Image: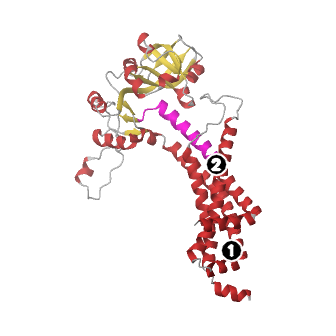
Amino acid sequence: MSLILDLARGMLRRRRRQTLVSVGGVALGVAFFIAIAALMRGFQGFIIAQLLDVAPHVTIKDEAREPPLQPVLIVEREGAVAVSGVRPRDRVRGIRAAGEKLAMLEAMPGVAAAPVLQGQALLRYGARDVSAVLTGLDPERHRRVSNIEKDMVAGRLEDLRASANGIILGAELARRLGLGMGDTLSALSPAGVMLSMKVVGLFRTGIQSVDQNNAFALLTVQQVLQDRPNVVNQIALRLEDVRRAEPLAREIEARFGDRTESWEEQNRNILTVFVIQNAIMYSVTGAILLVAAFGIYNIISTVVFEKTRDIAILKSLGFEAGDIQRLFLLQGLVVGVIGAAAGSALGALMIEGLAQVRFGTATPAGNEGFILARDWRIYLVASGFALLASGLAALIPARRASRLDPVQVVRGAA
């Protein structure tokens, strides 16, 4: 094997310029793959972290995923029956037996649960009216299912208990209303109840839609405002292992019958965009590596053509077809290994260069530059892709070289 490796190195060294071009092509492909993947994964990881930071991992709602079947459809399951124009029943909204369900959920290992009453409210300050989503919560329990407290720029979640009818606003919502800490506003619910509420906290998550439209109050205050005493319409869950969210949501929905959504289901449109971004990234960087693979194919094919007599001599000396195939396949892999190593180093330098870029203005989440993922798995995937492309590019000419008949070669030379 060492003799075959020496022969492969010698053949590549004699065509130094073409070899360097092929190595450079592989290195550039690997480097761009690493840099773009770091950008994409960093951005996607940041968005997912922001979503998981603000929202619960699983949400149980006071509704069914599908409307209940009408009696005639239950009785005549196989009959040619069609029902249309059925109006929903007028029933009191809210999760039934919420206390019992909370106890069952909290008994599950690695699960924290908190009751929530969420509803619309019209917030009025002076002549300014703004509609917002007001969430009633229990601070002690909600602290276990949400990280909203760490996003607070003023006040604390516990301050809701310290003040009568306290309210915590998103920073952008407070700006739209033109008020600040300690100011008093009026909150009007769809039920017609109006309360005077004092601003005891402000939060900024970096997600504009949340900061502009959300507010928090005590669960009991929200129940009074919505005229729904002792009612909760959501149960928020947070898991130690976020990967359990989707299967656990399906299990809870099958058990309780209430519509249960995981964070993946609630943000499916965003996750779909990530899939498209990844497809574009792999297509672009794959095209660069494909061009580099054609360069490797070209150099190995040329070497096979020029070394026809040498191949015949090697076979006459006892080299088998498999040895000849390994000789030229090894040349492609050597180019791939050197290119992958150089590309990994260049990719690391590109990541550090991108990390120094500053936009000159901070984003809402407080970032002034690119968010980059420094993950060793990116280098592994890029290098593996480069080796695969190099090996496949060298395989065709290597197989052709192994099939050469030394007798025919010698006769042709004579």
Residue 401 drawn at (x, y percent): 63, 76
The residue labelled by disc 2 is 344
The residue labelled by disc 1 is 304
Of the 4 image quadrants, the one containing the C terminus is bottom right
Nearer-the-camera pick, 121 or 141 = 141
Residue 236 drawn at (x, y percent): 38, 31
Nearer-the-camera pick, 135 or 272 = 272
Residue 32 visible: no
- Cα separation, mark 1 vs mark 2, equals 30 Å
Q: Residue at x 66, y 30 (%)?
A: 368
Judge the density around disc 2: few (<14), some (14-19), many (≥20) Cα neighbours within 10 Å.
many
Q: Residue furthest left?
A: 75
Callout 1 amino acid? Val
Nearer-the-camera pick, 336 or 67 = 336
Residue 311 visible: yes
Residue at disc 1, secondary structure: helix
The image shows residue 269, relative to residue 385, as above or below, that is: above
Mark 1 or 2, which is nearer the eye? Answer: 1
Colour scheme of the rendered structure: secondary structure
Q: Is residue 364 left or right of residue 226?
A: right
Nearer-the-camera pick, 337 or 245 = 337
The image shows residue 340, relative to residue 198, as above or below, that is: below
- Which residues make up the magenta segment? 32-57
Residue 33 drawn at (x, y percent): 63, 50
Residue 248 drawn at (x, y percent): 35, 41
Q: Residue at x 75, y 65 (%)?
A: 15
Callout 2 amino acid? Ser
